[in-house]
Amino acid sequence: MEQFIEKAEVLVEALPYITRFKGNIVIIKYGGSAMLDDKLKESVIKDIVLLEAVGIQPVIVHGGGSEINILAEKLGIKSQFVQGLRITDEQTVEIVEMVLVGKVNRMIVGMINEFGGKAVGISGKDAGLITAKKKPPVTVVDESGIEKTVDLGLVGGIEDVNPQIILTLVKEGYIPVIAPTAASRDGTTYNINADTVAGSIARNIKANKLIILSDQRGILREMNNEDSLIPRIEIGEIDELVKTGIIDGGGIPKIYACKNALMYGVKEVHIIDGRLKHSLLLEIFTNQGIGTMIYKKEESS
């Protein structure tokens, strides 16, 4: 009997958070190991379905980099990254779209529906959700300390977001699942970083929360030292953390996606460990907090 009482107490503890977030949109960026391990996949998807069942409105933006790497390798294409972004030529963008839209998106939608949710898969191209533009070349420093400019190819930035299709789906009780590909005004397909897409969508619909699932506890002060977690980062600290290399590689688009969202009205942003079972529920329904919270100081009047 004690174990049942404990379960009931957990539900009661979650009640204030359910009441607080009921009816609010939460953007969840889903990627990393949580998409590869079968048990973690099931855990994340069940968490998402539970959120919807208690009245929270989840919107999923997913990555799929590992799946893209696997197919690219099979086809003899070498994957190259600069500042966490995949250099993308015409052949690679076809692979990206094939994997993200044709495989990963379908998998997530199918699992949500299997566990009792109602999901609809879309990409940035659907209903003009995202208008892409070519991301400008980036400057990097090579091993010799020499600066060079790198053209990322068909890697896209975001020119515009029209969230009407998301708002319509949410209003009708569906869980949107979004693949991060989009087209420019001239019809060119671009590969867009999933963190960037999640941040921009959160910004444009003024989501209550943006949660990014990562393969670390959060932002670490020391690479590979999980005990060096930085629990809170004010957005004014971000540029210095990037400049000093504390945040690098794939962490760069993540942290700037968070900054973008906070600057334009998103209330809460978190980078949490997607390898931890039920990390979404722990973040939303407990007061302990996990991962790194990125926040914006309240402006005094």
Image (cartoon, helix red, strand yellow):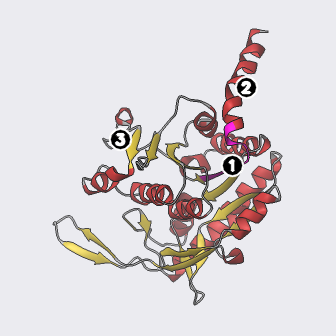
Question: Mark 1 or 2 closer to N-term?
Answer: 2
The quadrant of the picture occupied by the N terminus is: top right
Q: From the image, state whether disc 1 or disc 3 is nearer to you.
A: 1
> Circle 1 — which element?
loop
Q: Looking at this view, is 228 or 77 the one in front?
A: 228
> Circle 3 — which element?
loop
Read off the magenta span.
20-28
Label 1–label 2 contact, CB within 8 A: no
Left or right for 164, reference 283: right
Label 1–label 3 contact, CB within 8 A: no
> Which residue lies under the disc numbered 1?
24
- Amino acid at dot 2: Leu
What percent of the width, then of the height, locates residue 167?
A: 73, 63
Question: Mark 3 or 2 closer to N-term?
Answer: 2
Q: Mark 3 to mark 2: distance in Å?
A: 35 Å
Left or right for 4, reference 194: right
- Amino acid at dot 1: Asn
Tag 1: Cα neighbours inside 10 Å, few (<14), some, or many (≥20)? some
Q: Mark 1 to mark 2: distance in Å?
A: 19 Å
Q: Which mark is residue 11?
A: 2
> Circle 2 — which element?
helix
Query: Which image quadrant is residue 165 in?
Result: bottom right
Q: Residue visible at 58% across and 87% down?
A: 185
Left or right for 234, reference 245: right
> Which residue lies under the disc numbered 3?
224
What percent of the width, then of the height, locates residue 219?
A: 40, 44
Question: Mark 1 or 3 closer to N-term?
Answer: 1
Q: Residue furthest bottom?
A: 186
Q: Looking at the picture, does residue 68 appear above or below residue 13?
A: below
Q: Which mark is residue 143?
A: none
